[in-house]
Image: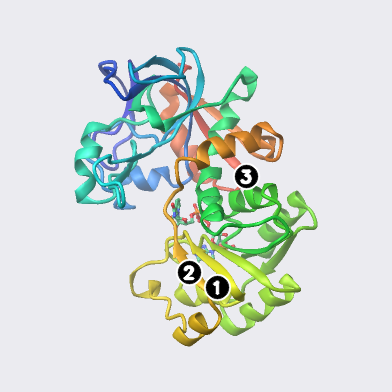
Amino acid sequence: MKAAVLNAFGAPLVLSDLPDPVLGSGEVIVDMLAAGVASYTAGVLSGARNYVLELPIVPGPGGIGRVRAAGPDATRLKVGDLVYCDATIRARDAVHAPDAILLGWTARTPAAMPLHRAYHHGSFAQRVRVPTENVTPLGDLDPGEIGRWAALGRLLVPFGGLLAGELKAGETLVVSGATGGFGAAGVMVALAMGAGRIVATGRNAASLADLARRHGPRVIPAAMTGDEARDRALIAACAAGPVDMVLDFLPREATASQVRAAAMTVRGGGRVVLMGGVRGETGDLALNYNWLMHNNITVRGQWMYDREAVPRLVQMVRAGLIDLTGFDLAEFPLDAAQEAVDFAAVHAGPHQLTVLRPDRLG
Ligand SMILES: NC(=O)c1ccc[n+]([C@@H]2O[C@H](COP(=O)([O-])OP(=O)(O)OC[C@H]3O[C@@H](n4cnc5c(N)ncnc54)[C@H](OP(=O)(O)O)[C@@H]3O)[C@@H](O)[C@H]2O)c1
């Protein structure tokens, strides 16, 4: 098969011939049709993001494809089914706290290295091998729409946080970092789940205004200044009532003070779900013990999403609750993988969707 290979951090992707993946029991081989290229892919491939990766590797965290072969233990999947391949692969030998990797993207921890070696190559290839539980049938799709479905990879991440926080229809949600790739996807998914009001935060008023224009009156932009008390008061004013839940997608450059500005707007019994990248010493939130206790606040982190989130999100898109035409799609053939990575880096807007088409060459 043909695949785009990363041989060294910082080197360009090289179109190469690799052996076809070999099917094992409990596995599926998928012919890849569309793989999302995140805006920060260049930072992963250069090594700047310090993702744990053994090289060489075919990068690419999942995407859309067609089942080419399924193992003998698959009961429903058929050859030819269109599926979403989820890159989140969990070890099967530690049910309560499984080590997990993102296929073709990061091993995350040294403990997960056996998984990274067993399921190594990702979706910037004509074929990929994944555990059976990582493929979800999509049903029939208009061939012209297949590339857009790669947006599932972005939408699933905030869906995981919204499910973890048990967002309910009619509730008021604050999305911190709402103009980012994952924050904006969180706004889309929360609206589809029935959020009554979403206070969308970011520092750039123009980006926030664009977000609000796209999504209508349930989205209220709140431009942050960096003054924690002032920002908290603005969020509370924009909520115009109790805040039920906060979904944080602030990036690693942000500070604990920015996180707190939103987190401490939740009502008694409210939920705060942390999904962003705030880290290091600035990642110590220093949320007040007494405030947490007396107000029955739930604060939880969430990495990715449970497996059940995938078929649920597919249903929501199929039902028309999430409109994938809201993304500006740019597609690249497999032999233009490096161009796709470069393009995604400079077209990093929250509604831009760069997609590699491994089913196409030149
Ligand atoms: N938990 C998970 O499973 C999971 C999965 C994927 C990604 N993530 C994490 O999610 C975070 C967000 O990713 P993304 O791709 O959505 O990021 P992004 O596109 O860079 O968006 C960042 C958002 O935060 C805002 N922001 C506020 N303060 C900022 C600051 N000091 N520096 C930069 N931006 C700031 C940005 O708007 P303004 O610049 O206008 O303020 C924007 O809305 C990352 O840290 C990523 O690692 C987590």
Where's the N terminus, which quadrant? top left
- The residue closer to the viewer here, 353 or 107, is 107
Q: Quadrant of residue 103?
A: top left
Amino acid type, label 1: Ala
- Distance from disc 1 to disc 3, alpha carbons, whole Å, reads 26 Å
Residue at horizontal 71 percent and vertical 52 percent from the top? 194
Q: Nearer the viewer, mark 2 or mark 3?
A: 2
Left or right position of 140 against 323: left
Q: Is residue 362 visible?
A: no
User: In x, y percent, where is residue 202?
Assistant: 61, 65
Q: Read off the residue under disc 2.
A: 299
Disc 3 residue crowd, few under 14, some 14–19, many 20+, Cα 10 Å: many
- Distance from disc 2 to disc 3, alpha carbons, whole Å, reads 29 Å
- Distance from disc 1 to disc 2, alpha carbons, whole Å, reads 9 Å
Q: Mark 2 falls on what kind of element?
A: strand
Q: Quadrant of residue 245?
A: bottom right
Q: Mark 3 falls on what kind of element?
A: loop
User: In x, y percent, where is residue 183?
Assistant: 57, 55
Residue at horizontal 68 percent and vertical 60 percent from the top? 208
Is residue 294 placed above or below 69 in the rendered structure?
Answer: below
Q: Nearer the viewer, mark 1 or mark 3?
A: 1
Left or right position of 37 against 347: left
* Residue 351: assigned label: 3
Labels 1 and 2: the sequence-earlier one? 1
Q: Residue furthest bottom?
A: 290
Residue at horizontal 46 percent and vertical 19 percent from the top? 76
Q: Is mark 2 within 8 Å of ligand 1?
A: no
